[in-house]
Amino acid sequence: HITESLASGVLQVIANITKAISKECEVHVIYSKRPETPPVEELEKIFGPEVFLHYIEATREINPKKDFRTAIHYYKAIKQIQPDVIHLHSSKAGVLGRIVSVFVKNKKTKVFYSPHGFSFLMQDMSHIKRKLFLGIERIMTLLPGEGIAVSPTEAYYARKLNKSYNVHLINNGINLNEIKNLKQSQ
């Protein structure tokens, strides 16, 4: 799993996925920090000892120099880990990870991308910036990989990017049993 945003809903989804699969396969999480990202000690508790955590500096905003450096670090980590599956979370990791995956020699590696909310739908930025993000997402669908949407609306927009882009819907990405248990304990 590679994410620029390891906080909030993205953290919850990745934690749920890794808990479900870490008993059966080796799991690595490559992440960067935002102000709301929990400290590493808390992340280690959330993920448990079965999951390998790798911190790589990345920025949320587009910054060609820093983004290139992040892509190089992603490439090195992927080469070292040699994963069978790469699951990219959020826009920044989705773009950089898909570009890097083209250069990874193991062509059998499956690549999946979950945007967790497309940047081009954000209303708190200019129309020009949203159009730029829409164009980037459309170009990225031409690279190897498949989409995993976490809601029907996200799946709808992902399919609109490119009619031949393969998108899977895993609604919500959250273990509903945990929510039911939480409700019952209150």
Image: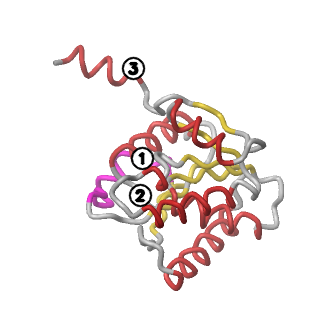
Please name the amino acid that badge 1 sits on.
Answer: Val
Furthest toward the left, the residue is 186
Task: Identify the residue shown where x is 40% and y is 22%.
Answer: 176
Q: Position of residue 20 (x, y in %)?
A: 52, 33
Mark nearest the camera among 3 and 2 is 2
The reply to whether callout 3 and callout 1 are in contact (CB within 8 Å) is no
Q: Earlier in the sequence, mark 1 or mark 2?
A: 2
User: Residues under labels 3 and 2: Cα distance?
Assistant: 25 Å
Residue 95: x and y, percent? 60, 63
Secondary structure, mark 2, is loop
Under mark 3, the amino acid is Asn
In this figure, which residue is indicated by the disc labeled 2?
Answer: 5
Quadrant housing residue 159 = top right
Quarter of the picture holding the C terminus? top left
Does residue 41 sit above or below 74 in this rendering?
A: above
For mark 1, give the secondary structure.
helix
Element under disc 3: helix
**Which residue is pictured at 59% across the width and 35% down the height?**
156
How many neighbours does mark 1 have within 10 angstroms: few (below 14), some (14-19), or many (20 or more)? many
Q: Quick one: label 2, few (<14), some, or many (20+) residues within 10 Å?
A: many
Q: Residue furthest front?
A: 127
The region drawn magenta spans 36-51
* Location of mark 3 (residue): 177
Identify residue type, mark 2. Ser
Closer to the chain start, of discs 3 and 1, is 1
- Tell whether label 2 touches label 1 (CB within 8 Å): yes
Q: Mark 1 = which residue?
A: 10
